[in-house]
Amino acid sequence: MKKKRRASDIQSVIMTVLSLMTVITSISMGLLLYNRYETAMRQNDVRDAQNMMETIVNSMEQYLKSMRQISDTANYNIIQALDISSPEFNQELSLLYDSNKDKIQSIALYDMEGELLVAEPVTLQKEGVEVSRQSWFENAKAKIENMHFSTPHMQDLFQDDAKRYHWVISLSRAVDVIDGDSPENGILLVDMKYSFIEEMMDRINDRTRGRYYYLCDREGKLIYHPYANEISNGLFQENSVLASSSEDGIYRNLRSPHGERQTMIVNTISYTGWKLVGVVLPDIRTDSLEKFRIYMMIIVIMLIMMLLAVNRIVSKKISSPILKLDASVTAYEAGEKPDIYIGGSYEIRHLGNSVQKSYEEIERLMKEIVEQQNERRKSELAALQSQINPHFLYNTLESITWMIEGNRNQDAVFMISELARLFRISLSRGKTIIRIEDELQHCRNYMNIQKYRYKERFVTEYDVSEEIYPFCTVKLILQPILENAIYYGVGDMDEDDHPRILVRGFKKEEEIYLVVSDNGMGMRREDVENILTDNQKVPKHGSGVGLINVHTRIQLMFGVRYGLKVESEPDEGTTVTIHLPAIPYTKENCEILEAPGKPPRNEVEP
Amino acid sequence: MKRTKMTFLLSEICLFILLLLCMHLIFSGEKPQKRVAVIVEKSGDEKWDSFINGLKQAAGIRNIHLIICNTDEIEDAQEEKSLIYEQLDNQVDAFIVQAAPGEDTGAMLREIRSQKPVLLVANDVPKEPENGNRTQYPELPAVMPDNYGMGYALGEDLKSRENIRGKRIGIVGGLAETECSRERAKGVLDALSDTGCEIRFHIHTTYDMAITEKLRKEKAVDYLIVLETSALEQIAGMYAQENGNHPGIYGIGNSIKCVYYLDEAVVEGLVAADGYDMGYQSVLEISGALKNQLYTMKNRETDYRLLHKEDIFREEVQQFLHTYD
């Protein structure tokens, strides 16, 4: 079952929306700034690497140039200038070696068959070494016009008393050797110390900086790599072939063999065609970047904290008048009578005023309804009181007494029965609405009693359509009219004038009319005009109070459209028309009509 | 209303805590490097060169400060313990140790391991008995080559290159009380079993007497199997100087000197452990334990190579030997 969501208060909603916007904006801003800084750092890092590489390339080229110079010196100044068998030859070679021994491991001269002619430092050649099959020798022999740089390798030529191997890069070339009178060809080998290059590269390779540099030849064979051992153990991979085949430049977003994106910078070293490659890794973890990341976090957190506080103040400012208004309305609903809060912005002020006015209007209407109810009760009480008019009761009981004394017991019984019925309908178990049939019955009872009292001096005729019997009416509306017709109309007339009261009842469209006419004395025009007004100062014809009471009660029950209409001509008679809505007498309709605060007009089902 | 206020206060408190944390990170500065002491016997010996190269390379990557203790022979557990305690006073965070000879080394190192991470290299300690008096201390992880496998490979190499049926063979092992010596010797003996050769002697290096002197006292043999680097260097050196006939030497050695004797054909078959890998892997393991206290260091077996004279200048062997420099 779906859980009903609890409605949030306005402050929460405002606060949540503002907070979300604040957080999203702050974080986005922080990320953008961080990204900008990181990009700048990366670019800076690449620039640094590039500068560093240029320096190293220069140093490397200087070094290689010096090696070439050593080789050239050995070739042009010693080998081609001096006889190999002369003591100066060895002396000069020794001098050359001594002056460069920090950079070179050895200088050796071989004939074209690979036999050692001379070497510096003077040492024994290892037994069984096949020099002619070593790559540096083969290369020099194959291309005699060139100088050849080998890749680093363990020197496999001379014996070492320390039982050690030397890592060297061999620079070999074909040379012309003077041996007595016959010039011969030979191969000059200058073995450069690899440690010199290694140290140079080691110095620039700082593993914590997220970048490294390596050296490879034109085939991609590694000459130096900071992770060379890891590569040989399979712990690291390097795409040196790609670097060797690349032109000098910066290559961004390359996919490394490990799947990471990296930037590769390639520089070619002169004389050798070697490539110095700088690799800038994507996950630069430099201190400054780490620190900047934390600084950005601090700024973002502080911004969020501050904006949250501002949001709270703003949301409180906006919601406070609404909440106060809500609180006063809630208190009003709970039955208290607080002043409706009017404050805050114009709109909320306007809302408060409207609510205040609405409540005032409701109160006024409530008061009106209560007053109407009171009025109705008063009218009904007055009507009831008129039923037990002591004079009427006295006269009726006197008549009954006379009847009994005159042994007219049947008439007395009839009178008492009629009187009893009259009161029964008058009371109607406290109801205000009764059927028209009962009201007519009540009217007949009353007229039967009055006929006895007036010794049947007037005639009462009924012309009532049975169609109207099952409709609603306010009780005791005919009796006061009939009473007036008797007292002020036909009661004092001579029998010769044929006094007559006619009661008619009919339905016209959705309305019911009960008409009481008499041919009595009638009323003057001004009396007719004032008879239904509730002004005590206006003199009324007879007891107009009864008619006003009936008129008021009908209007309170059914609305101002309904009520009485009096028509009279002096000496002609009077006609009083009761106008009612045609509301069927049902339990529901009765309950609606009798309910306090009911609609004043016939808004019930017709 | 109250809920909004609570949420606001909680958010502000959380953010404030986060802020303090960031401030702490900013002002705490650089974390001091973790210090790892490396205690191996005769740490200056050439046989440790590749191991130390591996240690240094991995330490550079993992930002570990290595303290390679300058040691001579470590004769027993007590001596090793005093070295370890010296380093404990030196605020060392972890140890990479070669187990000293002796049966009580294991217990001593296990006790140390309850205080600081300890990783064995090169030489293991005897395993605790499966059922019996187990100590309350955890087992010691070790990074080293398969010593049994090395011995076995050497024996197999001798078998494959020479007809040894009826030949006399002498075995020179490392210190008798070390686990690696036992394992290597076991490997050799297993490889040579059922070959019809005669093992004429099986001697061990000792602290009090040079192995060459001991060897001179033994009967002549056709082949000599040397299972320890220093012993191999000394014996090969001795025969290289004599320039006379000498038995065919097969050995286990982790130094360039041993390779050089192989190149000079004094040694005929050489099994060389990948010391670089041993050093590298041991730092990776120990740094894992230092970074995360829940990390369990694992035993790692490192590689070894069987070399002959003709292999030395092959490119991949040169690469391998470069780590020995």
Image (cartoon, rainbow, N blue to C red):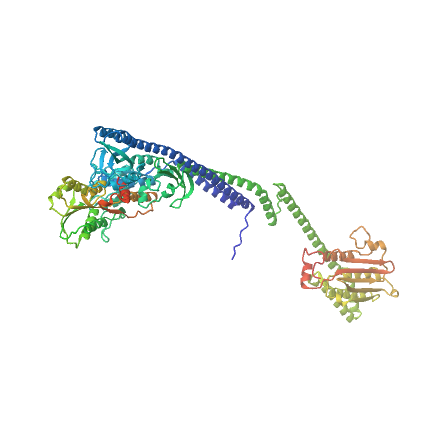
Q: Residue furthest right?
A: A496
Residue A248 seen by the camera: yes
Q: Tell me the quarter of the picture where residue A213 sits.
A: top left
> In this picture, is A145 found above or below B200?
above
Q: Position of residue A60 (x, y in %)?
A: 34, 34
Count of picture labels: 0
Residue A381 seen by the camera: no
Residue visible at 11% across and 45% down in the picture: B218
Q: Position of residue A82 (x, y in %)?
A: 24, 29
> In this picture, is A405 found above or below A50?
below
Q: Nearer the viewer, residue A578 or A104?
A: A104
Q: Nearer the viewer, residue A469 or A200?
A: A200
Q: Position of residue A140 (x, y in %)?
A: 29, 38
Q: Is residue A487 left or right of residue A28?
A: right
Q: Position of residue A283 (x, y in %)?
A: 40, 41
> In this picture, is A86 found above or below A596?
above
Q: Nearer the viewer, residue A380 or A4?
A: A4
> In this picture, is A573 found above or below A327?
below
Q: Tell me the quarter of the picture where residue B211 sits.
A: top left
Q: Residue furthest front?
A: A181
Q: Is residue A346 left or right of residue B134?
A: right
Q: Nearer the viewer, residue B95 or A241?
A: A241
Q: Tell me the quarter of the picture where residue A272 sits.
A: top left
Quadrant in the picture for the C terminus of chain A:
bottom right
